[in-house]
Image (cartoon, rainbow, N blue to C red):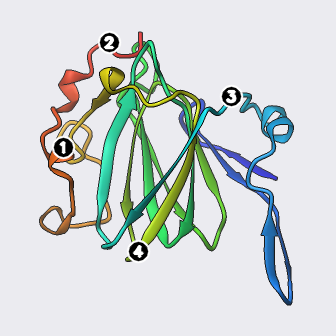
């Protein structure tokens, strides 16, 4: 398993080995003891999967706060995305900074995003499916979010804002100044 620590502490790209032969390939996408030895010792309690029909679909920026924070292990099972995590841990030296990575079904890489980060992605291909394991169950009361195109964050999304496909819920999210002390 290949582990790449990103520029913001806690964010990790994990690429499991892929075994190929004439039939196709096999990949062990999660193994608790191997992940723990790589520093990801979370207990995952829920799996989520999304399908985005159009390229340029933006989902995010989302998180959950206490008492139900979520860490996410994100991978793409079909297509590709630009995946982004924004540090919102109050007092962190990288507060307000982001890391973005390309994830694809082809590469098999996964992004580990611990609690304390906003998360979002933009699909790069039609009919992209994203699968993620989370360390906390969904809690509507703990759900928070920030506008994907917030000027303070100035994230380098790979889609023209006029072409982005968004949910009404994501369009109505507040700006980054709403974060405050979500993660003290």
Eye-nearest disc, 4 or 2 = 4
Residue 71 left/right relative to 54: right
Q: Is residue 32 above or below residue 129?
A: above
* Image quarter of the C terminus: top left
Residues at marks 4 and 2 touching, judged by CB atoms closer than 8 Å: no
Residue 177 - label: none
Task: Give the Cα distance between marks 4 and 2.
Answer: 36 Å
Label at residue 181: 2
Q: Looking at the image, which residue is at 21% across and 63% down?
A: 165
Q: Earlier in the sequence, mark 2 or mark 1?
A: 1
- Label 1 element class: helix
Q: Earlier in the sequence, mark 4 or mark 2?
A: 4
Can residue 156 be spotted in the picture? Answer: no
Mark 2–mark 1 Cα distance, whole angstroms, equals: 22 Å
Q: CA distance from mark 3 to mark 1?
A: 29 Å
Q: Callout 3: helix, strand or loop?
A: loop
> Does any portion of residue 88 appear in the rendered image?
yes
Q: Earlier in the sequence, mark 1 or mark 4?
A: 4
What residue is pinned by disc 3? 42
User: 153 or 47, which is in the foreground?
Assistant: 47
Numbered disc 2: secondary structure: loop
Of badges 2 and 1, the one in the foreground is 1
Query: Element type at marker 4?
Result: loop
Nearer to us in this view, 33 or 176: 33
């Amino acid at each position: 398993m290949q582990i790449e620590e990103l520029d913001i502490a806690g964010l990790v790209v994990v690429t499991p080995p892929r075994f190929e032969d004439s039939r196709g390939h096999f990949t062990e996408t999660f193994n608790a003891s191997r992940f723990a030895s790589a520093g990801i010792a979370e207990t995952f309690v829920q799996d989520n999967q999304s399908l985005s029909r159009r390229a340029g679909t933006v989902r995010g920026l989302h998180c959950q706060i206490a008492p139900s924070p979520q860490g996410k292990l994100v991978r793409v099972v079909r297509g590709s995305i630009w995946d982004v995590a924004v540090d919102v841990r109050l007092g962190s030296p990288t507060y307000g900074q982001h890391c973005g990575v390309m994830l694809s079904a082809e590469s098999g890489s996964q992004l580990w995003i611990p609690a304390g980060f906003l998360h979002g992605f933009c699909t790069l291909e039609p009919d992209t499916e994203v699968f993620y394991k989370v360390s906390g169950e969904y809690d509507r009361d703990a759900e928070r979010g920030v506008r994907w195109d917030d000027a303070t964050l100035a994230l380098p999304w790979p889609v023209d804002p006029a072409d982005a496909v968004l949910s009404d819920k994501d369009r109505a999210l507040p700006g980054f100044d709403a974060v405050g002390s979500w993660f003290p």
